[in-house]
Amino acid sequence: MTDIPKPKTGASVPLSPEVAVPARPPTSPARILRPYLRGGEAAELIGVSIRTLEKYRCTGGGPPFLKVGFRVLYLREDVEAWLQRHRCQNTSDDNYVAALREMPSRRNRP
């Protein structure tokens, strides 16, 4: 049996290639060019969680969507147009004020 020396306390231990976290696979060109996005892809493009996008579907205020069977799809150009409509130049902009009104109040939260 061979003795393996223990690293000193506080010393960093290099990760072996077997333990290293693999890099995220690049998005395929076919996925980038598709005209329709799934919920997770649209949420990622907008920069919100999937649950927030689901809430937008229930309460309104989000991008237009299609319901095909159990699947929800978003037309890429609809999502991009929705993002453009929410652009603001400054905090006095009408879009900014409207976005603040749409946000739920944080006063009653624990």
Image (cartoon, rainbow, N blue to C red):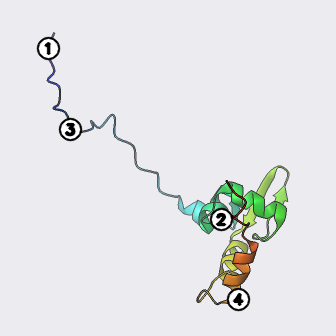
What amino acid is labelled 4 in the image?
Answer: Asp
For this view, does 20 lie left or right of residue 103? left
- Which one is in front, 49 or 103? 103
Q: Which amino acid lies under the numbered mark 2 shown in the image of this protein?
A: Arg
Mark 4 or mark 3: whose residue is earlier in sequence: 3
Label 3: state its secondary structure: loop
Q: Position of residue 76 (x, y in %)?
A: 68, 70
Question: Residue 54: which disc?
Answer: none
Residue flagged by tag 1: what amino acid is it? Thr
Residues marked 3 and 2 touching at CB (< 8 Å)? no
Query: Are the residues flagged by discs 1 and 3 in contact, CB closer than 8 Å?
Result: no
Above/below status of 67 relative to 85: above
Residue tagged 4: 94
**Picture residue at 60% right of the left edge, 61% below the top:** 44
Mark 1–mark 3 Cα distance, whole angstroms, equals 24 Å
The residue identified by callout 2 is: 34
- Between marks 2 and 1 in the image, the one whose residue lies nearer the viewer: 1
**Which residue is identified by label 3?**
10
Q: Where residue 70 appears, x then y in whole percent?
A: 82, 49
Q: Residue tagged by mark 1?
A: 2
Tell me the CA gap for discs 1 and 4.
72 Å
Compared with 80, 45 (above or below) is above
User: Few, some or many C-alpha atoms within 10 Å of disc 3 (few <14, some 14-19, many ≥20)?
Assistant: few
Amino acid type of the residue tagged 3 in the rendering: Gly
- Closer to the chain start, of discs 1 and 3, is 1
User: Pointers 2 and 4 in contact (CB under 8 A)?
Assistant: no
